[in-house]
């Protein structure tokens, strides 16, 4: 077999690389350069583990489809926060693998067909984004005060004040907080961002300020507090409801969509545009510039 590379008449050497090796190859040669490269790598490694660490040549549309069905049904759970994943999440994982094999072919690292090219993504509707109104916010804060977790109230207030993802707020360290500012690092978009905070919130954080991690894990306490409020949320919305609440109220109060993009750390404005319809004057020109209104004004 050692002579195959130099003696092509012996036939091609069998590709014994595992799928996880190709994931590493893709990451080192390309994934490391893109904003969500770490997220993609982590998702694909998890999928590879769930599929039994197959050889790359054993990774087929049938194998991925079986894995996808188990994830959708909740038979495979990557986190205890969610019982099952959404079709949108699985469409992302499909896109990750499809893009990976396309890139590896361009790099000359993969000579076969793209194994997931024939798989169709799930049809999805635009995700409903729930947010809390003022009464619900006050109700939630009251339950956080009553919680036995001493860090819960502060983490919730940080999320509501800065639009942070739960994991970003919960993992803050002392070095991330300066006077009236919070700087988020190691974010989903791999871009650091600094968001102003009120003096009141700064003083609340300062009470707990240390050199290392500021907070212990408190997501389960948040889930319990939210359950006590009896606020009903769509499936999969719990971990993001505070972020959605910040963004929705920001726009309803006349905030600028480009400023919101920077606060949330979105790399693509299309992500932020989901909140544009909350602006008080959103599409108001439809009233003034529709053909009926124009014809009536000309007839006066």
Image: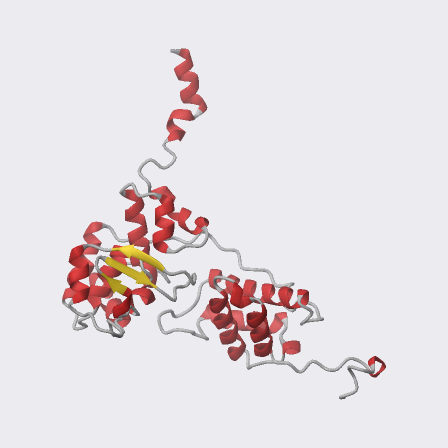
Q: Position of residue 45 (x, y in %)?
A: 51, 75
Q: Is residue 61 toward the left or the right of residue 295 in the image?
A: right
Q: Position of residue 217 (x, y in %)?
A: 27, 74
Q: Residue furthest right?
A: 9
Looking at the rendering, which quadrant does residue 210 occupy? bottom left
User: Who is closer to the viewer here, 64 or 144?
Assistant: 144
Total marks shown come to 0
Q: Residue furthest bottom?
A: 1
Q: Residue at x 63, y 72 (%)?
A: 60
Q: Residue at x 18, y 70 (%)?
A: 208
Looking at the rendering, which quadrant does residue 22 occupy? bottom right
Quarter placement of the N terminus: bottom right
The answer to whether 244 is drawn above or below residue 71 in the figure is above
Q: Position of residue 54 (x, y in %)?
A: 60, 80
The answer to whether 150 is drawn above or below residue 135 in the figure is below
User: Who is closer to the viewer here, 83 or 41?
Assistant: 41
Q: Residue at x 20, y 54 (%)?
A: 198
């Amino acid at each position: 077999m050692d002579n195959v590379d130099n003696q092509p008449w012996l036939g091609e050497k069998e590709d014994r690389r595992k799928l996880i090796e190709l994931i590493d190859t893709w990451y080192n040669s390309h994934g490391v350069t893109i904003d969500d490269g770490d997220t993609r790598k982590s998702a694909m490694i998890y999928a590879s583990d769930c599929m039994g660490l197959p050889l790359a040549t054993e990774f087929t549309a049938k194998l991925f489809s079986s894995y996808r069905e188990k994830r959708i049904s909740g038979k495979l759970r990557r986190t205890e926060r969610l019982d099952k994943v959404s079709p949108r999440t699985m469409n992302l994982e499909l896109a990750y693998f499809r893009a990976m094999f396309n890139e590896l072919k361009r790099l000359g690292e993969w000579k076969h067909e793209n194994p997931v090219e024939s798989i169709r993504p799930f049809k999805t509707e635009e995700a409903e984004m729930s947010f809390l109104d003022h009464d619900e916010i006050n109700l939630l804060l009251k339950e956080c005060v009553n919680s036995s977790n001493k860090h819960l109230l502060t983490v919730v207030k940080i999320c509501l004040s800065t639009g942070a993802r739960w994991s970003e707020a919960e993992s803050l360290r002392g070095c991330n907080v300066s006077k009236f500012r919070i700087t988020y690092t190691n974010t989903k978009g791999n871009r650091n961002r600094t968001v102003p905070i009120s003096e009141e919130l700064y003083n609340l954080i300062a009470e707990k300020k240390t050199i290392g991690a500021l907070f212990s894990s408190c997501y389960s306490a948040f889930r319990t507090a939210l359950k006590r409020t009896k606020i009903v949320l769509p499936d999969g919305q719990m971990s993001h409801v505070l972020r959605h609440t910040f963004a929705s109220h920001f726009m309803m109060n006349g905030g600028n969509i480009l400023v919101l993009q920077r606060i949330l750390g979105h790399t693509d404005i299309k992500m932020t545009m989901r909140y544009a319809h909350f602006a008080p004057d959103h599409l108001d020109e439809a009233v003034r510039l529709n053909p009926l209104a124009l014809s009536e004004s000309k007839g006066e």
